[in-house]
Structures are given as structure tokens and as C-alpha cells.
């Protein structure tokens, strides 16, 4: 009982901290839009250039859409239905959000100069299945180390098995950058600018 209570408290504290951190991040974005389970923050890319599979080149200063999942929703699904069913539902909700995002890239003026949709996650295997994201490893350095530590801590807080899950999967829990360029978004989710089922 105390273990369950402690886990619940840890999750509550984490979500309060994450909401505060997300609020701060919005001040660093030029525009923020919610698409179901996903949020996209439009900002300028900072750092080394990124060469994508379709030859799109993202330079320092180019506009990108930074993709974030709503961890409040995911945590509620995990508590209500367990991690396996929650993962399936999250994947379905993410696909629905991706269709909305691809339409926004075509129709909304805020997205006109955005070159690509970019996210960073440890759970790239589950999230990329059926969504067509290109994967690129983060370059070694301080940012990768900090991102790895943050995302593993997030998984510890969110997953029912907590630290045991992280310890068992440590070698596989490497952060990856997920990318959809304007072209790949359109090819994957739109046909003639309209939604496909």
C-alpha cells in the first residue's frame, strides 16, 4: 500500500513540475498549438544542421515544430487500463493527432515556414510504428546526457514498474530524434491536401 502511495505521490509531483516546465517552454516558442494528445511548439532550430532522409536540410535558425506528448493523458490511461493497453491507445491517439498536424502544416499560416516536425523520445520503437517517423540518434555530448537522464527519470515516474523497468531496459533506452519533414508528413497522412483514413 505504501509503495503504491509513494508511486502516486511521485507521479503527482512530477506532473506538477512538468506543467511548470511546459509553461516556461511556451515562452521560448513562437507559437504553440494543441492537437489531441500532442502539442507542437514552433521555434527556431538551434545547433548543428540536420540532414533528413528526403534531403531536407534544417539549418541553425530554421523554423521547426517541436513535438510533445501530453503525459497527463498517458498517465491517466496507464492508471485506468495498465501500460500495455495504454500504449495501444496512445498510438491510436498519436496517429489521430498526426493527421491534424499534417493538415495544419498545409493550412495554417503559423506553420508556413516550418521545415519539419521534430521530437525526442526514449520510446521510439512504439511511437514510430505506423507513423513513419525518421529516426536519428542524438550526437554525443552534454545535451544527450541531460536528455537521457531526464527521459529515464520520466519513465521511472510514469511506468508502473518504475526503476525496475529502466534498469532492465537501460541499453535500449537511448534517446532518438524523430523527424517528419513537410514532404514526409504530406506523403504519409494527406492525399491531395485532404485527410486519409
Image: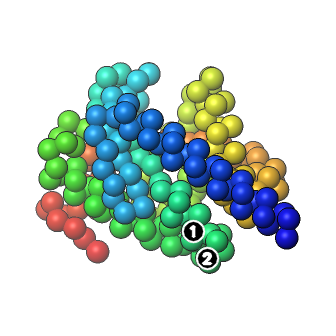
Residue 16 or residue 77, whichever sits in front: 16
Residue 59 locus on image (x, y percent): 33, 24
Residue 188: numbered disc:
none
Q: Which residue corresponds to the image point at 64% horizontal and 39% vertical from the top-left? A: 150
Left or right of 150 on screen, residue 195: left
Residue 76: numbered disc:
1
Q: Look at the image and tell me in which quarter the C terminus lies.
A: bottom left
Q: Look at the image and tell me in which quarter the N terminus lies.
A: bottom right
**Quadrant location of residue 192?**
bottom left
Total numbered labels placed on residues in the image: 2
- Label 2 close to label 1 by CB (< 8 Å): yes
Left or right of 113 on screen, residue 122: right
82 lies above or below 49 = below
For mark 2, does the 10 Å Cα neighbourhood hold few (<14), some (14 to 19), or many (20 or more) residues? few
Q: In the structure shown, which secondary structural element does the residue marked by tag 1 occupy? A: helix
Q: Which residue corresponds to the image point at 68% horizontal and 37% vertical from the top-left? A: 149
Its colouring scheme is rainbow
Q: Which residue corresponds to the image point at 61% horizontal and 35% vertical from the top-left? A: 147
In the rendered image, which residue does mark 2 sit on?
Answer: 80
Residue 52 or residue 60, whichever sits in front: 60
Amino acid at each position: 500500500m505504501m509503495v503504491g502511495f509513494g508511486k502516486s505521490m511521485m507521479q503527482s509531483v512530477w506532473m506538477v513540475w512538468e506543467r511548470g516546465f511546459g509553461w516556461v517552454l511556451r515562452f521560448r516558442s513562437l507559437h504553440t498549438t494543441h492537437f489531441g494528445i500532442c502539442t507542437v511548439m514552433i521555434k527556431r532550430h538551434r545547433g548543428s544542421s540536420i540532414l533528413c532522409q528526403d534531403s531536407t536540410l534544417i539549418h541553425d535558425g530554421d523554423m521547426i515544430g517541436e513535438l510533445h506528448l501530453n503525459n497527463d493523458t498517458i498517465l491517466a490511461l496507464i492508471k485506468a487500463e495498465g501500460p500495455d493497453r495504454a500504449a495501444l491507445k496512445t498510438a491510436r491517439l498519436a496517429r489521430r493527432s498526426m493527421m491534424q498536424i499534417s493538415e495544419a502544416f498545409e493550412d495554417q499560416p503559423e506553420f508556413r515556414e516550418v521545415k519539419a516536425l521534430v521530437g525526442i523520445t526514449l520510446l521510439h520503437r512504439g511511437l514510430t510504428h505506423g507513423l513513419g517517423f525518421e529516426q536519428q540518434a542524438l550526437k554525443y555530448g552534454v545535451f544527450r546526457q541531460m536528455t537521457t537522464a531526464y527521459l529515464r527519470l520520466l519513465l521511472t515516474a510514469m511506468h508502473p514498474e518504475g526503476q525496475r523497468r529502466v534498469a532492465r531496459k537501460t541499453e535500449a533506452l537511448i534517446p532518438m530524434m524523430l523527424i517528419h519533414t513537410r514532404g514526409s508528413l504530406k506523403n504519409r497522412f494527406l492525399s491531395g491536401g485532404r485527410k486519409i483514413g
